């Protein structure tokens, strides 16, 4: 990875009191879902900081994320909005959760790949975009109709949603005071 980029420029969440974190990594298209390993790295880093971590999403599952406060498949939209409104930080893929967090003006870290984050930038909101700038295919959905590929990566690899442990740690350290 070349550098860590944030949009808008020079945002750093300077909240010394980030206690409640909501994480949602489901996305409408399979190619917009971050690799599980990337999410687990984020969770391990946050868990070391003794944060309250809530996992949200549509599908109830038993997996590596179930050991956290797992609210997947349990919340109505109204309940989800309440959970997000009580969060200090929301970490999400490019999904409905991202837009809810933005409308509530929550500190948000958004993991992007096939959609160019500039297309999703809300003016004056507290959002950081984590994305790989070392791939030529980044933002491919602005060039290719992903729906023709059933929401899967047109190049098969989906590397744009694979963030290394080091990249995630550097991003968090640079952009979020926990």
Image (cartoon, rainbow, N blue to C red):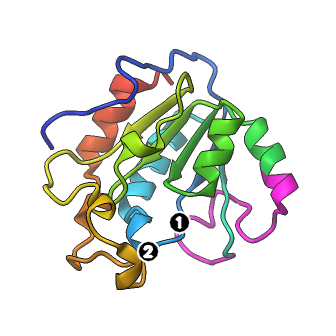
Q: Quadrant of the N terminus?
A: top left
The stretch in magenta equals 60-80
Identify the residue at image location x=83%, y=44%. 82
Q: Which residue is mark 1?
A: 27
Residue 13 seen by the camera: yes
Q: Residues within 10 Å of mark 1 (few under 14, many from 20)?
A: many
Q: Which secondary structure, mark 2?
A: helix
54 with respect to 42 (left or right): right
| Residue 34 shown left or right of residue 60 in the figure | left
Find the distance from the CA under tag 2 to the CA under tag 1.
7 Å
Quarter of the view holding residue 129: top left
Q: Residue at x 69, y 70 (%)?
A: 58
The x, y position of residue 119, in whole percent, is 42, 44
Q: Which residue is mark 2?
A: 30
Q: Badges 2 and 1: C-beta atoms under 8 Å apart?
A: yes
> What is the chief secondary structure element of the magenta stretch?
loop
Quarter of the image where one finds residue 6: top left
């Amino acid at each position: 990875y070349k550098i860590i980029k944030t949009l808008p420029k020079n945002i750093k969440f300077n909240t010394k009191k980030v206690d409640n974190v909501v994480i949602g990594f489901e996305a409408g298209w399979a190619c917009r879902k971050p690799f599980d390993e990337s999410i687990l790295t984020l969770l391990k880093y946050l868990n070391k900081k003794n944060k309250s971590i809530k996992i949200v999403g549509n599908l109830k599952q038993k997996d590596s994320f179930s050991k956290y406060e797992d609210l997947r498949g349990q919340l109505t939209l109204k309940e989800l909005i309440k959970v997000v409104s009580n969060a200090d930080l929301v970490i999400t893929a490019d999904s409905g959760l991202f837009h809810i967090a933005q409308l509530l003006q929550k500190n948000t870290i958004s993991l992007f790949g096939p959609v160019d984050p500039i297309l999703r930038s809300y003016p004056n909101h507290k959002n950081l975009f984590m994305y790989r700038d070392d791939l030529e295919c980044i933002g491919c959905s602005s060039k290719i109709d992903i729906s023709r590929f059933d929401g899967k990566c047109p190049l098969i690899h989906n590397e744009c949603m694979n963030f290394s442990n080091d990249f995630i740690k550097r991003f968090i350290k640079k952009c979020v005071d926990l």
